Structure formats: C-alpha cells, structure tokens
Amino acid sequence: DTLIIMRNFTEFARSVERLRFLDLEMKREFNRTFTKSGKGKKREDEVGGLFAVNQDVSLFETTIRVLGGLLSAHQLAEAFMADRVTVEEVWDSYGEILLGNSTRSNYPIATESHTELDREDGLVNADETCRKFDVSDIPSPHKESSFQLPCNETTTHWIYDGFLLSLAQDIGSRLLCAFETDTGIPYGTVNLLYGVPKDETPVASLAGAGTLTLEFELLSRLTGEGSFGEAAKLATRALWTRRSLGLNLFGKHINTKSGQWTEHLSGIGSNSDSFYEYLIKHYLLFPDDSDFWLMFVIVYSGVWENNRLGDWYADIDMNHGLDGHVRQVFESL
C-alpha cells in the first residue's frame, strides 16, 4: 500500500505479480511435497499457497500488519491503479517480472508495424493501441518462448483483479480458529497450517484480543463473509462485559477460557493501548455498529476519572483505582 501512496505504481503492479507467482508456486509445491507431520491435522480445505506454512504467528501482529496491509493495498489499488501501468513495465518478453528500473523496449506485439513505445510518464503512444491486458494471458515465469498480445482499440494497461483481497481472505481464514474459545476471546497465537498450537497459553492481553475488529469487519464487508467481523466484534464485546463495573476499567491480561483476569493492573500503555483506539476507530469506520461508540465513551470516562494522576495517567488496580496499587510508570504510546 505504501508504494501507491508514494505513487510508485509500476513497482506496486510488479509486487502484486510477484506475490501471485509465489502463491502459485507454493500451491504447486504444497501439492507435491506435503506430508502430515506430528504437529496436528491440516485444515480440511487446505490447498496450499503463500500462507500455507508450518509457522506460529501472533494473531495481533498478523492482523494489524499482514491482513491490514493487504486490505489497504486492495482498496488503494481499486481506487488509484486504473490505467496507471502498462504491461510492458511489468513483464519482459519471456513473462519474467521486471526489477527496479528495468524496461522492455522490444516487447513483441501482434501487429505488422510496431514502433517504439513512449515510456514518458509510463504511457504508451496514442497511435500504439493494443487491447487491455488480462493477467491470465501471461505465461508462467521462466517460460522459454516469447509471447504476443492481440491488438484492438485500447491501451495495454496492467489491470488489478482483486488478487490481494483473495490473499487477505486466505490469511483471515487461517486466523479465524483463534476465536474458538468458550468466551469468544481469542488465543494469541495461531499456526498457519495447523491452527492453535496444542501448548498455547490461554492467557491473552487486552490489546491482543481486542485490536482486531477493523481488519476483520472490513474483510467481512469486502468479501460478504460475515464470520470474520462477527468473531472479532464478539471478542471485543466479551472483553467489555468483563470490565470492573464500578470503575469501568480493564485488566491487562485475561484467561480466554475462563474469562477471568490474570493481571488486574489497568492503564493505557503496553498490552492495553490499542484496545481503546479500536473502539473509536471502529465506530468511525462502521457507524452502524453504534455500541462501539457507547463502549468508547464509557471507557474514556473510566480512564479520565480513575487513571489520571495530575497531568499523567498511571497504571492502577482495575477494581480499586487510585486507592489500590498504583504504578507510576510512563509508558503510554
């Protein structure tokens, strides 16, 4: 997504195609070489791909960085990538994805008279018109023979086909098993191939379990599969119901199976900060989930009335406030 923000549209298109190639190659390799290990059973619908790796990952970090990045890139591509990049800037004449400042001036086009392309601003000369390009026409990389494109009345532009959203849906599906707990509050770690590790701790942080709704709800709305957003919102609401009713405060760590807090220290710094952030951001992005605004207002009031110590915000006991244990350490981000 940063490549689009920086207006490096050519490298963005190439990056999408590199991911597509890696995804395809990993699917082929998975089908050829996968054998069951002793760690557990793979998902029933497993077909391999970019994320089909035997690797434990953080639910929180993977959601905000990988899933969030893919969703942002997808939306930016749909908004800004139309007619930005020509096919000649993405592949060479053998179907290899170009690198860096590489260009291709000898691109074979199915026409009897072919003039040099004008690469200024990444555009093709107006009199050099060939049909819009579909990615299915490009052969697999490393194909030895060159290929040609049929011509018609349109320009040969690279077209974004929603591939990043399909990757987002894949990684989202792999993370979804983390929410399968008695409370709906998710585990903190997932193995991308086998699910939640057998020895995974049931203890999760407030931020780790409650900073997921933006990405998962957006994934639901873009794909039409409601299970993603429903799971993440249930987790936030499950945490909400376990606040201290007198002070409206939250601990920093909770047992996802029992719903009991394992750390009663409450603050706006580490292990907590983004939980508060996502309450207001979720409402701003999805105002139809109006309870997130109510939750934010009550939480904000609880922090303002109880955690404030002069000009600072201290870590305090979620049940006793400033009358209990107070940790005067500045760590809010």
Image: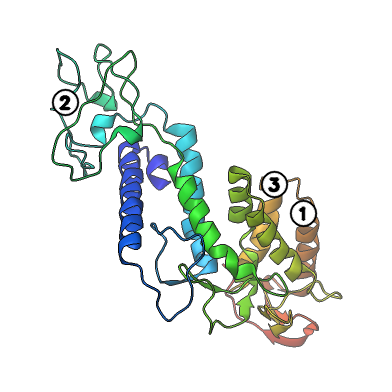
Amino acid residing under circle 3: Phe
Residue 293 circle label: 1
Depth check: give the residue in front, 229 or 273.
229
Q: Which residue lies at the image location 25% right of the left edge and 38% below the top edge?
A: 139
Residue that mark 3 sits on: 286
- Secondary structure of the residue carrying tag 2 is loop
Depth check: give the residue in front, 236 or 196.
196
Tags 1 and 3 touching, CB below 8 Å: no
Vertical comparison of 191 with 107: above or below: below
Residue 297 as seen in the image, left or right of residue 213: right
Depth check: give the residue in front, 186 or 306.
186
User: Nearer the viewer's eye, disc 1 or disc 3?
Assistant: 3
Which tag, 1 or 2, sits closer to the chain's start?
A: 2
Which tag, 2 or 3, sits closer to the chain's start?
A: 2
Tags 1 and 2 touching, CB below 8 Å: no
Amino acid residing under circle 1: Trp
Q: Residue 53: where, in percent of width, then height?
A: 39, 66
Which tag, 1 or 3, sits closer to the chain's start?
A: 3
- Mark 2: give few (<14), some (14-19) or many (20+) Cα within 10 Å: some
Residue that mark 2 sits on: 108
Q: Which residue lies at the image location 48% right of the left edge and 39% below the top edge?
A: 76
- Mark 3: give few (<14), some (14-19) or many (20+) Cα within 10 Å: some
Q: Which residue lies at the image location 63% right of the left edge and 44% below the top edge?
A: 224
User: Nearer the viewer's eye, disc 2 or disc 3?
Assistant: 2
When asked about the image quadrant of residue 10, the answer is: top left
Between marks 1 and 2, how big is the CA–CA gap?
A: 57 Å
Between marks 2 and 3, how big is the CA–CA gap?
A: 48 Å
Tags 2 and 3 touching, CB below 8 Å: no
When asked about the image quadrant of residue 146, the answer is: top left
- Mark yes or no: residue 263 visible: no
